[in-house]
Image: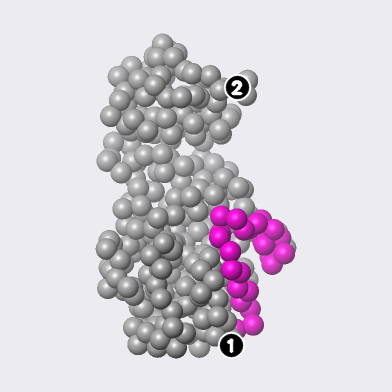
Amino acid sequence: MAYLATPTATSEIIRKHGFHFQKKFGQNFLIDANILEKIIRAAKITKDDCVIEIGPGIGTMTQYLAEHAREVVAVEIDKNLIPILEDTLSEYDNVTIINDDILKVDIAGLADKKNGGRPVKIVANLPYYITTPIIMGLFESNVPLSSITIMVQKEVADRMQVGPGTKDYGALSLAVQYYAKPEVIMNVPPACFMPKPGVGSSVIRLTRFTKPPVDVADEKKFFSIIRSAFNQRRKTLANALANSSAIIREDGKNKKITRDEVCAILDQMGLSQTIRGEALTLEEFAKFSNLF
């Protein structure tokens, strides 16, 4: 039975194993059972599911996942936590512990081995410093997944779900919304963690689209244009793209885009030549990309 989600139980396990928090791994362990139960419900975990948990820590959420899922694969980068996980998860025969960097793990291979190639569900309390690389790595590698339910810094969760014209709207917003439907489930205060983080957190569920909501002829070019548009977000789209190093063209070569080319396409789309990237919708970025 899950028992770790209290300050007392967490402290006892840490003392028992002589564990020391490592700042480089962004370790903040959940100590609130109500939050964990809400995460399980938000992720819609059932006995049919194979779940991959990123950063299980001492196994607090892993215990909940193991009690609700058919199989759990817990990927932990900190080798010092492996003996703790082997202790706290010893009662569960449906958990596999992997000591590795999630960015280096063959998740598609894991899905094939553990779930017959069917989509897996990702659940995680992510270190804030590496949230974006992990999320984008999961999407861009075409891993078979149905949803990602994660605890992230509140500011990052806000960024994932907003639309054009807001200060948080940017490349991450567009990338996430191209691949998935984002829904913020709840906000979580620092007091729910040990140690307390310096910022608020949010749980967000990203439900993977079977097909992106927009048609894009060349995804590399599409995302290159988006990144360039927001690298210099105070500039107009025409100036930002003209000042960018390169845009992936349809002939497969990198070639600088000119301001005149951008303005010609904006005219074709009925948009102002002085518009900024932050004003374009996902659909408009897709159309803009396809017109090259």
Q: Position of residue 114 (x, y in %)?
A: 69, 67
102 magenta-colored: yes
Q: Position of residue 230 (x, y in %)?
A: 37, 33
Tell me which segment is drawn in magenta: 92-115
Q: Amino acid at mark 1?
A: Glu
Tell me: residue 101, above or below residue 277.
below
Q: Which sits in the foreground, 167 or 233?
A: 233
Classify 10 Å Cα crowding around label 2: few (below 14), some (14-19), many (20 and above).
few
Picture quadrant where residue 267 is located: top left
Q: Which sits in the foreground, 78 or 211?
A: 78
Is residue 47 in sight in this rendering?
A: no
Are dots 1 and 2 in contact, CB under 8 Å? Answer: no
Picture quadrant where residue 162 is located: top left
State how far apart marks 1 and 2 are (Cα). Answer: 55 Å
Q: Which sits in the foreground, 181 or 87?
A: 87
Tell me: residue 65, above or below residue 109.
below
Q: Which sits in the foreground, 198 or 211?
A: 198
Q: Residue at x 42, y 24 (%)?
A: 244
Q: Which mark is residue 253?
A: 2
Q: Which mark is residue 240?
A: none
Q: Amino acid at mark 2?
A: Lys
Residue assigned mark 1: 91
Is residue 1 in sight in this rendering?
A: yes
Q: How is the image coloured?
A: one colour
Considering the numbered disc 1 on the image, is that residue within a helix, a strand or a loop?
loop
Dot placed on the residue nearer the N-terminal end, 1 or 2:
1
30 sits to left or right of 105: left
Q: Position of residue 128 (x, y in %)?
A: 39, 58
